[in-house]
Amino acid sequence: MFRLKDGRCCKMPLGTICVFLFHHSIFFFHLAHFCGGVSQVVGPSDPVVAIVGDDTVLPCHLDPAVNAADMTVEWTRSDLTPRFVHVWRDGVELVNKKNEAYMERTSLPINNLKLGDISLKLSKVKLSDRGSYKCFSPALSGQASVELVVGVVSSLIITVMGNSEDSSKVVLQCESAGWYPEPELLWLDGEGNLLSAGPTETLRGPDDLYTVSSRVTVEKRHSNNITCRVQQRNTNQSRETHIHVPGDLFNPPCSSAGHITISVVVTVLLILAVVSVVWKYRSKCRGGNTKISTDHRELQPLTEKKREALHLTEDGTDTVDFDMEQENLNALFKDGEEDKFNLIMVVQFLMSHKCDLENDIYKLKLKLLELQKQQDENQSQLVNNIKQIEQNDKKSDKINEEEGIETETNFETMKENLEKEIEEKETQRKSILYGVDVMTEKKKELDDTLYKIHRQRETIEKRTNEVQIQFQSGHSEA
């Protein structure tokens, strides 16, 4: 019985009351289930990116979070046999169900499981780990997918290929091997601007790793700082290397005969320059009786005894000795500056010639490799030809064998000539390096000598001023 607002009573059948209570019970049951019921497995919306050799985490969690330490959690890959990457059951890992490729590389931290975090930690990532993973728990509703993208990066090498047909340009090559996924190669100038380069050559090896290479022609500029960059957009990984192209490389290429002639001339000039510098300074220092000293004690004011020792006359004519000594030092300093400039020019010339030789050696080695490859192909072809004519008469077999021996002899002769030429250029290069070392050492000695001359000039100038002041003081007292 229900009582109305006006005080009257109203009778309601018992069946109606039961239906009313049933519907409201169902409502509260669903509400309780929605607010604090069964958790769902939730994974990431974006792929996970990892680099070979690093550790990574495949994220997965329960929503709402509940303690999963006593639950069964499975991580699987459908493309593997067995498909289990990691199985957690009754508080331990079931290793016997695990794929061997993931042995001792996966884990589910117990502290994370208690917080509803069932993310899988994967150590020492391999290229074969890339793919789609499933995160699943039988006690919960649904499963989550996690896509793992694995990248491989490598170092870069820039090689100076030499001058192009235009002697004011230099060709550079950049190469890098061992990348995944397929990267792109870019050339940048010193200001970070893209350079127009040739097409990128891409090769994929049997290990699924990519090798990329590209060439660019650099023009002569005030600043030739060039950058080669290899990058992967989907893994957001990049590597780069830099090179400074000196202005000495922008020179016309010389022929082999020209290199030999220049090498001889350079050697002669080197010897003459060294002998000339040494002889000139020794003779000047001995002949001019010029003492090069930086003893600071000579800068002390002249005493009366020092004045008498200098035999100064009242007209100060003995100061001419100081003037002559100063003139000798000035002339010696000027000659030293000229010789220093000549040494620098010789070193620059030698370094430019060294670069030309290194480019020639590189090209000769490429020819030698190509010749060896051609020789191997010819030997293989010769063996096949011999097999094909085994059924013919012996005369044909003998003629073919003689032709093969003659061809082999020609190859050996060409190889010997190339190896000899490479050896000669290597000898020239080493001679030039020795010459650069000698000239650099002489320049250091010359710098030291010029510094001492400069200090001695300052000393003489101060002594001259002291003599003049003391002479004027003595003259005024008289």
Image (cartoon, rainbow, N blue to C red):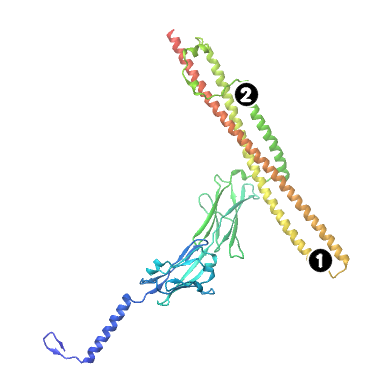
* Left or right of 396 in this view: 229: left
- The answer to which image quadrant residue 292 occupies is top right
Return the residue found at the far left.
7
Q: Position of residue 6 (x, y in %)?
A: 11, 86
The first of marks 2 and 1 along the sequence is 2
* Nearer the observer, 168 or 73: 73
Quadrant location, the N terminus: bottom left
Q: Secondary structure at mark 1?
A: helix
Q: Which mark is residue 284?
A: 2
* Nearer the observer, 154 or 339: 154
Q: Could you tell me the amino acid type at mark 1?
A: Ile
> Label 1: few (<14), some or many (≥20) within 10 Å?
some
* Nearer the observer, 12 or 91: 91
> Label 2: few (<14), some or many (≥20) within 10 Å?
some
**Residue pointed to by mark 1:** 386
Distance, label 2 to label 1, CA atoms, is 79 Å
Image: 229 above or below 325 = below
Question: Does residue 200 show up?
Answer: no
